[in-house]
Every structure is written in structure tokens, then in C-alpha cells.
Amino acid sequence: MKVLDESLFWMLLPFCHLLASAAEHEEVARHAIKLHRGKGATAMQRKQWVLDSCRRLTGLLRQKNVVLNKLKNAIRAVEKDTSLSGEEKLFQVHTFEIFQKELNESENSVFQAIYGLQRALQGDYRDVVNMKESSKQRLEALREAAIKEETEYVELLAAEKHQVEALKNMQHQNKSLSMLDEILEDVRKAADRLEEEIEEHAFDDNKSVKGVNFEAVLRVEEEEASSKQNITKREVEEGLGLSMLIDSQNNQYILTKPRDSTIPRADHHFIKDIVTIGMLSLPCGWLCTTIGLPTMFGYIICGVLLGPSGLNSIKSIVQVETLGEFGVFFTLFLVGLEFSPEKLRKVWRISLQGPCYMTVLMIAFGLWWGHLLRIRPTQSVFISTCLSLSSTPLVSRFLVGSARGDKEGDIDYSTVLLGMLVMQDVQLGLFIAVMPTLIQAGASTASSVFMEVLRILFLIGQILFSLAAVFLLCLVIKTYLIGPYYRKLHVESKGNKEILILGVSAFVFLMLTVTELLDVSMELGCFLAGALVSSQGHMVTEEIMAYIEPIRDFLAIIFFASIGLHVFPTFVIYELTVLVFLTLSVVIMKFVLAALVLSLILPRSSQYIKWIVSAGLAQVSEFSFVLGSRARRAGIISREVYLLILSVTTLSLLLAPVLWKAAITKCVPRPERRSSL
């Protein structure tokens, strides 16, 4: 009997909070502690307490069944009532069903608490894995309960709205309406229909989709809304302020599409971020110009000052980086405008062979060093591939306004450099496409390695086919479409330059969309768009460049500032010696490998340009940020390696203008030299 009493006590302990009234909570809790410790209570008292608790629980369940029967009778009565309209019957039946659901869910919660207590008592407190699984099950149960409660709350809000509207209709029926009231009533009904038509039930449609997880988040209201003292909670929830959601992993989310699309909204955090970057970029760029550094350094410094390692005032980091990507798009478009297809025919072999040889040599050196340092081959290949890429936007800024030719008949160093960078962009798209398969191949067993190799070869063939399709499309556009398209734009844009700007921008976006759909990098599409437009002649190039350059300059400021957001000076200072050594090693290795490869593939008469081209390729591309983040999420590299890649990339970009200026000063004759910095 004693054992039975104790087991009943443990089963009924979770009911204390549910069964006792508010005034009895403290007394019941104190009594439960005494029973658990076996002090201050006799066996008879323990038995009496268990019997009273069972009696209360039985009474609650009996009352619940009685109420459910009454609700069923009420539903049948409403369905038989002929005085109610069909819509009113549905509303009242739905309200009763909501109450039924609430009663059943409350009962289920009680028994789920009992089962949870039984699992906890049967588990081993020394088994961390078992406790983690129990905690995970409780968390899932709580998430499901929260979703059900949220759904019920929304249904109650809809019922309340329906009740208010029904009351208004009754009042309108009892009095005559003026013409204005009738018009407003018709407008109200039309507005309700509009909201029902455009509203997307995204939550209900996606909560049962495979791969969707329920998570607990914090909702932080906008400061402007919360600072108003005469605003109610419901007005805050339905107001124009944008809430911020924060999950358990400290990721922050903002509203992308509101439920009510009829009311315009603006992301004030994003607006403030862009305004702040624009204002601070001026003094930073001005300072760098004064001391003889490129202005892009000032923009990067601006991002460092405003980013997480500085004032931490940028709230919409992802949005700023997304806008900065358009700076890359227009930069590469202008590079394509200055890129001559006739000159490309001279260097297409160099542009194709050079990056491939450099990538293979970098991977070979990476595997060798990885073998010495006992680094996994997958990680060595990834790091080597990241470091083999060079920054196309940065070199494009170097080449703006620089000399495009040196001697008649010689190969132009800018053409060689841009051709090799375009090929590296193609390699980037290929590597991004193959990386998921490489991840799976690294985790596969020996029996499936052969299939994974075949899958990688299939992907490479698919990318090569996509490249062939892109260049075939470019040939068709150049031959039949680009000429009539530009002439039509030129005629329509007389006295209205917006048409020309929009037409050129739409063509750029079309090309990047096509290359993206074909699994080739969007950057290559922008470059090809510029090259196609430049085929229409020098006058066309000059006209379009005059319109697009101001847009490019502003978006480039955002892009370089977004790079500064990922620079962490404190980490660089802590590991300055290691980072400087690694950066110099990477820069020197890339410079030497590029010079070696170019000395083998360049004609003898153009050997002098290998030093300039090698200097342009010696830094690391900013796209290593993107590749590094994906690899870190996939588990290819660790957090420490990721930070090292970011720091080495940043330091190499800062070192690139110095190396470029030294190469230009050394190799380009003074009468033909122009400052490209």
C-alpha cells in the first residue's frame, strides 16, 4: 500500500498546479515537499492527500464530459434553427468547436505531463544522451502546443471580428443609413473581400512541409512603436512598425512580406544603415585620397567602423551585402564595355590555360602542405581553391583609366588579366556547383566513391555544356538582337535618359538571370552583357558609360563597405604575426606561380607583362567569404580556419594596391603610364 501511495503521489504531483486554486498553491507545494521528504506527515495523511487529489481530478474530468455533451446539444440546436442564416450557423458552430478543442487539448496536456514524468523517472540521470533526447521531445511537444495555441488565438480573433461586424449590422438594420454611410459600408465590404483575396496563408501552407521546423523566437518591437505610451498592445501588433525576430541561435530576422499588403511599410533600419554608410564613406574615402591610398580602402574602413567589430550600428547586414552585390554586377558590366572581343581572340588560349594551371598548382601545393600538417584532403582542396581565386572587382578598379596598349602588335596586359579573371569567375561557378557533391563524397563510404566520382564528372560536363550554351546565346544576340535593341532604345530615349538607363540595366539583369539559370556565375553574365554592348562601337560605349558610372560608383561604395563588415581588427591584432606570415606566403606564392605559368604560355615578345598580370592576380578574391561561409556550415572547415581565411583575404586585398602600383611603376614606361589607383 505504501508503494502504491508513493507511485500515486508521483503521478499526481504535476496536477498540483492544475487542481489547486490560487489561494492553495503555496500550501499544496509545501505539503508535497513534506510528503516527498517523509517528514511531518503520517501514512494516513499521505493517503488522504492522494485520495483528495484523485477526487478533484475525477471531478474535473466529469465536468469536462458534461460540458462537451452540452456543447454537442448546442451545436445540434444551432443546426436546426431556421431563423439563422447559413453564415451565422457556421460561425456559431465554429465557436463551439473551438471551445471543444480547448477542453480536449487541456486534458491531453495533463496526461502528457504524466507520461513525461514517467519517462524522467525511468531514465538515468548519468546518461546525458538520454536526457538530451527527453529534452528534445519536451521541446517538440511545447512547439506543437504553441502552434496549436497560436492557431486557436487567430481563430478567436476572427470570431471576435465577426461578432463585432454582426453587432454593427444589427445596429444598421435598426436605423436608416445615409447615402454616405451606405457608400462607406460598400467600401468596407469590398476592402474585406480584397484582403481575403490577397492574403496568403503562408503559415498554414508551410507548417506541414517536409523540412520545416518549429522554433521558439523572441519578437522585439520597433523602438518607435514601443516608446509611445498611449498605444495599446493590439495597436502595436497591427501597427506599421517592423518587428524583429531573434531565434535561439541569435540569428535576427526582419519582416519581408506583411500579412496586410494594402499598407505600405519601410525597413527603417535598412534606410538608416545606407544613410550612415553614405555619410561616413565620404570622410574615409577623402582621407585615403589625401594620403595616396585608393578610395576603396576608405570604404572598407567605413564598414569596419560601423560593423560588428566597431560601433555595431549596422542592423541589416544581409540587406547591405545584397545591395552591394549590385555594385559587383555594374562594375563587371563596365569592365565588359571596355573589353574588346578582338583583343580577346588574341589571348583566349592564355585566358583559358593560365587560371587552370594556377588552380592545379595551388591544389597540389595545398595537398602537399596538408599532408605535412596532417590536414584532411577535402579541407586542403577547399582552402587551395579559395586562395587560387582573385578579386575581379578590385582589379577592375585598378584597370579603370589605365593604359590599354603598349606596343603595336604586343598583347595588352589588361586584356590578359581580364581574360584570366573571367575564367576564374567560371571556375568559381563550377566550384560552387560541385561543392555539395564534394561534401557528400567526403562523407561517403569506399563502396560509393566511384559513384560520387561519376557524379562529379557529370556535373563538370553539365557546366561545360552550360558555358557552350551561354556563348552560343551571346553569338545569336550579337548577330541579330543587340543592334536593333540599342537603336530602339536610342530613339525612344531622346530627351529621356531614364529609358536608356532602364533598357541597359534590364539587359544586364537578363544576362545574369540566364547565366544563373544555366548554373554559371551571375558575374559572367554581367561581363558578357558589357562585351555585347561594346560591340556596337566606341560612341555607344562612351554614352552608356557616362550614364552607368555614377550608379556603379555608389553601389561599389556599398559593396566595399560590406567587405569591411567582415573584418575583425581585434582578431587580426591578436594573431597579427601568424596572419602577416600567412598573407605574405599566399601573396608571394600566387605571384610566383602566376609568373611561372605566364612565362610558359606568353609569347616571347610579351614576356614583360607577366609581372603586371602576376601582381594583379596575387590577392585573394572576396568571394572566399561566400565559399568559406558555405564550407563552415557544411562542416568542411572549422571556425578557426574560417576566420583565418577571412583575415588573410582581407589583408591580401589591402596589400594588393601596393603590389599593383609597384608593378605598374616598374614595368610600364613613364610616358605611357596612367594612374589607375
Image (spheres, rainbow, N blue to C red):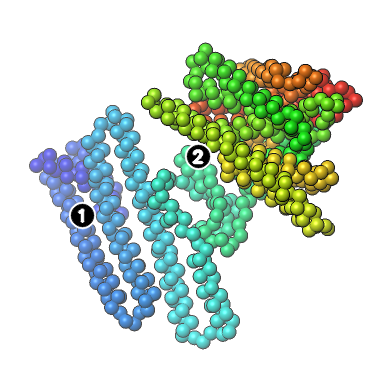
Task: Estimate the x, y position of residue 410 in percent, counting from the top left.
Answer: 81, 25
Q: Which residue is mark 1?
A: 57
| Disc 1/disc 2 C-alpha distance (Å) | 42 Å
Circle 1 or circle 2, nearest the eye = 2
Name the residue rendered at 27%, 76% in the picture.
77
Q: From this viewpoint, which residue is outermost toward the right?
A: 671
Closer to the camera in the image, 146 or 626: 626
Please state, as top left, top right, bottom left or bottom right, where the C terminus lies in the image. Answer: top right
Q: From this viewpoint, which residue is outermost toward the bottom?
A: 176
- Which amino acid, mark 2? Asn
Task: Estimate the x, y position of residue 429 in percent, counting from the top left.
Answer: 59, 35
Please state, as top left, top right, bottom left or bottom right, where the N terminus lies in the image. Answer: top left
Q: Is residue 44 visible?
A: yes
Q: Is residue 673 visible?
A: no
Q: Residue 250 bears which disc, if any? A: 2
Q: Is 219 located above or below residue 357 in the figure?
A: below
Name the residue rendered at 79%, 21% in the picture.
606
Instruction: Bin the neighbour count of mark 2 within 10 Å (Cα to Cα): few under 14, some 14-19, many 20 and up.
Output: few
Q: Residue 612 bears which disc, if any? A: none
